[in-house]
Image: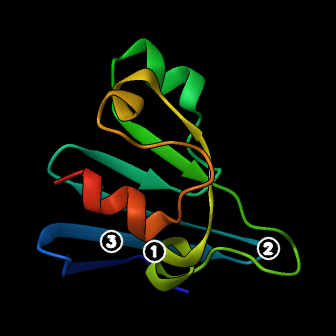
Amino acid sequence: MPVRVIPMVHEGVPVEAVEAGWQGGQFVLMVAPSGVLACGVVDPVVMERFGAAVAVARGTPESPLIHAADLLAARVAEVTAAAAALGIAPGMTGAEALAKFA
């Protein structure tokens, strides 16, 4: 799977989705004006040190997060303080979180 950067608009929010894969692994993330929605490849502890607004969802071997649509449907597992300040919380769908990154 090559690296793909996909410009899109989700509920009025301009987003750049990045999908990347290699033999045995993959990741997906979406960069919005105020923060990042990502799969578990992004470490929220590290991003917290930089004050970044980040929401992380996690896939499973049975249901991996490969494409932007997978990330939008997934549930947020962790957020940084900056993301929480935007109203993003664990349990939201990726789509709900992304709308708050406007």
Q: Position of residue 57 (x, y in %)?
A: 61, 56
Q: Nearer the viewer, residue 57 or 97?
A: 97
Q: Are marks 1 and 3 in contact (CB under 8 Å)?
A: yes
What's under tag 2, amino acid-wise?
Answer: Gly
How dense is the environment of label 1, judged by Cα within 10 Å: few (below 14), some, or many (20 and up)? many
Mark 2 or mark 3, earlier in chain: 3
- Between the C-alphas of marks 1 and 3, the distance is 7 Å
What's under tag 3, amino acid-wise?
Answer: Ala
Q: Position of residue 58 (x, y in %)?
A: 70, 58
Q: Position of residue 55 (x, y in %)?
A: 48, 45
- Between the C-alphas of marks 1 and 2, the distance is 14 Å
- Between the C-alphas of marks 2 and 3, the distance is 21 Å
User: Which residue is depicted at the point 53% across and 71% down?
Assistant: 71
Mark 1 or mark 2, earlier in chain: 1
Q: Which mark is residue 19?
A: 1
Q: How many marks?
A: 3
Disc 2 marks which residue? 24
Q: Which mark is residue 87?
A: none
* Secondary structure of the residue carrying numbered label 2: loop
User: Which residue is depicted at the point 45% across and 79% down?
Assistant: 68
How dense is the environment of label 2, judged by Cα within 10 Å: few (below 14), some, or many (20 and up)? few
Residue 15's place in the image compared with 69, above or below, is: above
Disc 3 marks which residue? 17
Q: Are marks 1 and 2 in contact (CB under 8 Å)?
A: no
Residue 45 appears in which quarter of the rendering?
Answer: top right
User: Which residue is depicted at the point 35% across and 39% down?
Assistant: 87
Q: Nearer the viewer, residue 88 or 10?
A: 88
